[in-house]
Amino acid sequence: MKYYFNEIEAKWQKFWSENQTFRAENESDKEKFYVLDMFPYPSGAGLHVGHPLGYIASDIYARYKRHKGFNVLHPQGYDSFGLPAEQYAIQTGQHPAKTTKENIETYRRQLDQIGFSFDWSREVRTSDPSYYKWTQWIFIQLFNSYYSLEENKAKDIQELEERFEREGNREVKAASDEKVEFFSAEEWKGYSREQKDVILSQYRLTYLSDTEVNWCPELGTVLANDEIVNGVSERGGFPVVRKKMKQWSMRITAYAQRLLDGLDSIDWPQPLKDSQTNWIGRSEGAMVDFKVNGHEAFIEVFTTRPDTIFGVSFMTLAPEHELVSRITTSDQKSAVEEYVLSASKKSERDRMSDVKSISGVFTGAYAVHPFSGEQIPIWIGDYVLASYGTGAVMAVPCGDQRDYDFAKYFGIDIPNIFKDIDISEGACEDKNAKIANSDFISGLGVKEAISKVIFELEKRGIGQGKINYRLRDAVFSRQRYWGEPFPVYYKEGLPQMIDEKYLPITLPEVEKYLPTSDGKPPLGNATVWAWDTRKNTIVSNELIDEEFVFPLELNTMPGWAGSSWYFNRYMDAGNDKEFCGKSAINYWKDVDLYIGGSEHATGHLLYSRFWQKFLFDKGFVPVEEYAKKLINQGMILGTSAFVYRKEGENIFISKGLVKDEKVQPIHVDVALVNASNELDLEAFKKNTFHKDIKDAHFILEERKYIVGREVEKMSKSKYNVVNPDDICRDYGADTLRMYEMFLGPLEQAKPWNTAGITGVHGFLKRFWKLFHASGDFAVNDEAPNPEELKVLHKTIKKVDEDIANFSFNTSVSSFMIAVNELTALKCSKRSILEPLAVLISPYAPHIAEELWSKLGHKESISTATYPEFESKYLIESMKTYPISFNGKMRFTKELSLDLDKAAIEKAVLEDERTLKQLDGRIPKKVIVVPGKIVNIVG
RNA sequence: GCUCGGAUGGUGGAAUUGGUAGACACGUUGGACUUAAAAUCCAAUGGACAGUAAUGUCCGUGCGGGUUCAAGUCCCGCUCCGAGUACCA
């Protein structure tokens, strides 16, 4: 009987779906295991072969764990809010909900076709009101919380208010905006409700503020730092400029230290941890106040090297620094203003690309050195960033190369404060140097000098030790339609939360998805978008009276809102009373294995850790880190194909004949090219996207047109996308699954190349054949012999180890070896083949189910217990020893494993081949490692 | 610039705590079956040299050193490629 994979696969996919085979229960005596994939954004292009790579790996793991007796949660859903659907809506007028739904259907069909064991009863869609209701709910919790630095956790904002009432804010240690003014209890009590709200917003974990944001005019929205790549938008590659706007922000900086510390407790890839560490960017140092001569003002600077304070010979402020206009002297005024203006015009990208040129202007003002009292000129320069530290630096040219270059360029003094170090060629950044010419720290090493300076600064009240982070608060507003609406209305310009019980606030209908003519976000087009505080419902804008009916927020939440907590929702997806029920979350707790791409390192994976910590602080979730282990699957790249068109002529030259000809490479669809890089000319000519190709002349080599190849990211525009549907149709899902694993280590990026797929497909056919003889199913009940048992058990052992190491490629090889060996042994015994089917079933579930049912089982193979490895079948009595001479293997000799060192040595030395090798020489030394090797030296 | 990966046959990739480099596939070549093709099966396949042959010798894991009886694996110094990040005070 032939292996009809299409029929078999359709049959079992139907069976799993009808029997809800992979439904996970929230109550079970079994140990839980939660396997999660990063859920996809359902794009219009559908799945390509790169998407399933991680899903296949996690599915194998999930199925394996089921066999091992775990209650496995393996859900899937869609991150279905996002820019592409909205861009498409702008172009075509179609509602994003409609295209999103269609795209989801395509994804679902494609996913089903690959035979994943997802529990679809728990599917989530971030754009579904029943889901984003809880995203809005979490937002409200954040709004109603502040971060206590005394207890190091988020707490109810009401407690803070009560404390203000009692004692003002002077003693309060809480995460807040930079400049919070002190007030007493009496002053607090005297404030109006509005004044209090403004103050509280400086402490809330989400707050509205005028911030400098990354504005992308083409997309008409602001972007978070992680959504910008090389100075342009990640989506679309559009320019980004800086702009001040009133925006919701998330006070993620409150969690900087805990986000850093938490990394030690989770098993995530080191590069991923490193990039989070760098993104958070912790640096230890000191804040120092420099008095400005002749002004009441102080310039506060952050430095990681307070030990070099006696090397300060100037200060540099960012052009945007608030003191610049105040302290600039009249004769420097015009130069400074001109510089500030030109700096503000430079986009972030210009400033980034222009790292080498040095520019700056003297303000005419001087600061006073806090220890020596010397006059220090104050400059401005755009190498100082307003957004980092305090936007001002104390410049130590002898100890910092940038300061050194700046000083050299403008002819500023470079005092040397290092002992016996020459600084005529450049700054000394070596931390092993000894400090000199530095008053009370002369002669000290860097470390001691730092602590002594901090001690002095604190004693004199002019500074203190400080830990600074690069991490900024995250902008949370987007000027887009297709995102979660905020549960917020505005009363006299101040944001008010809508009560939890009226959630969800669902997206309104709009005529157009573009910003309004007066520049408001798309929700500004909605006519029914006001909040009635009496009826507690959304009403028409016409009813706004600023007394009972108020305008609703026009921004929506960013893409990462919904993805920051979805892993918790899967645990109890249908719950309409809570974001996740207590008993469900206490059972499932956290994700045991999370698989996804490394591109989310500083976006999703940082924000979601932040929200989880917040939810933990508030007692909503039982664990502080939601994913114990994370694996990054490597990207599958496309292998683009090129034809070479002679410049200016309608002639295409086969690759081997191009030589020095001037040609223009043109992408051709990889579907038109076979495994030996030969172009299907007929099909190519029929292709309509270049009209003149029909008449083109082709210069062939050996009657073939050979294309050029290049590995690139898989993308529609490069005509190198390979669709899993085609593979499933031609070879089957089981072949696709195994082949994707066989390509190489999971974490490694690799080009997609179907060349080897026949090898995997052939393996499945041979596996099928083991169970059949001359067309019929033929498995017998004969007792297995030691050889067959050995094959089975070494495979069990290897596959167990491989799955533990996520080394799926090598287990595919082991299966091949097992099937090759059993075929050679002509084994068709149930006692061997039945366990083998279970072993293979996580990898190739359809064929395994089919064979399992043919073996007479009524239940799904997924309920079968995994075969137990028994070492007794692998015990060997003989070992083929490699016999080496001076480390080079010359021959092998079979010897009993019972022999001790001396007996092995004797046997080897007596061997005639040894005598021949030695050729009369006497061995200096004989190394015998029983069970391993023999090495003869001499 | 900094941080982190990586480099093994014609190709994808294997290789326990250092212990027979190239498993398993693809491709290629030869053969069987067939009218033929596909499918399937069998054999060979890192390179060079010697030999009719069995076989033998040398070279081989990016480069140069080192440690060791023994190095793809450990140490030192480079080269190239990839990813992330970037005036971070």
Image (cartoon, rainbow, N blue to C red):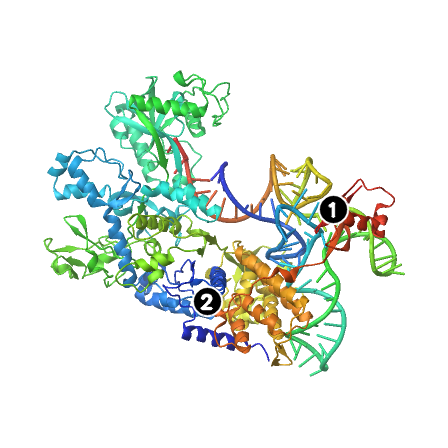
Which dot marks residue A928? 1
Badge 1 element: strand
Q: Is residue A38 above or below residue A279?
A: below
User: Is residue B12 rendered to the left or right of residue A155?
Assistant: right
Question: In the drawing, does residue A299 fall left or right of residue A112?
Answer: left
The reply to whether residue A306 is in sight is: yes
Residue hosting label 2: A116
- Quick one: A225 or A779, which is closer to the camera? A779
Q: Secondary structure at mark 2?
A: loop
A105 lies above or below B22: below
Coordinates of residue A321 in the picture (x, y in percent): 29, 33
Judge by depth and name the residue closer to the eye, A487 or A187: A187
Dot 1 and dot 2 residues touching (CB under 8 Å): no
Which is nearer the N-term, disc 1 or disc 2? 2
x 15%, y 35%: residue? A185
Q: Quadrant of the N terminus of chain A?
A: bottom right
Quarter-of-image position of residue A345: top left
The image position of residue A608, as x and y in percent, is 36, 51
Q: Amino acid at mark 2?
A: Phe
- Kindly report the distance in space between the C-alpha atoms of the residues bearing marks 1 and 2: 50 Å
In the image: residue A597, left or right of residue A772? left
Across and down, in percent, residue A599 comes to 44, 51
Chain bearing mark 1? A
> Label 1 amino acid?
Val
Circle nearer the viewer, 1 or 2 = 1
Q: Position of residue A189 (x, y in %)?
A: 12, 38
**Image quadrant for the C terminus of chain A?**
top right
Disc 2 sits on a residue from what chain? Answer: A
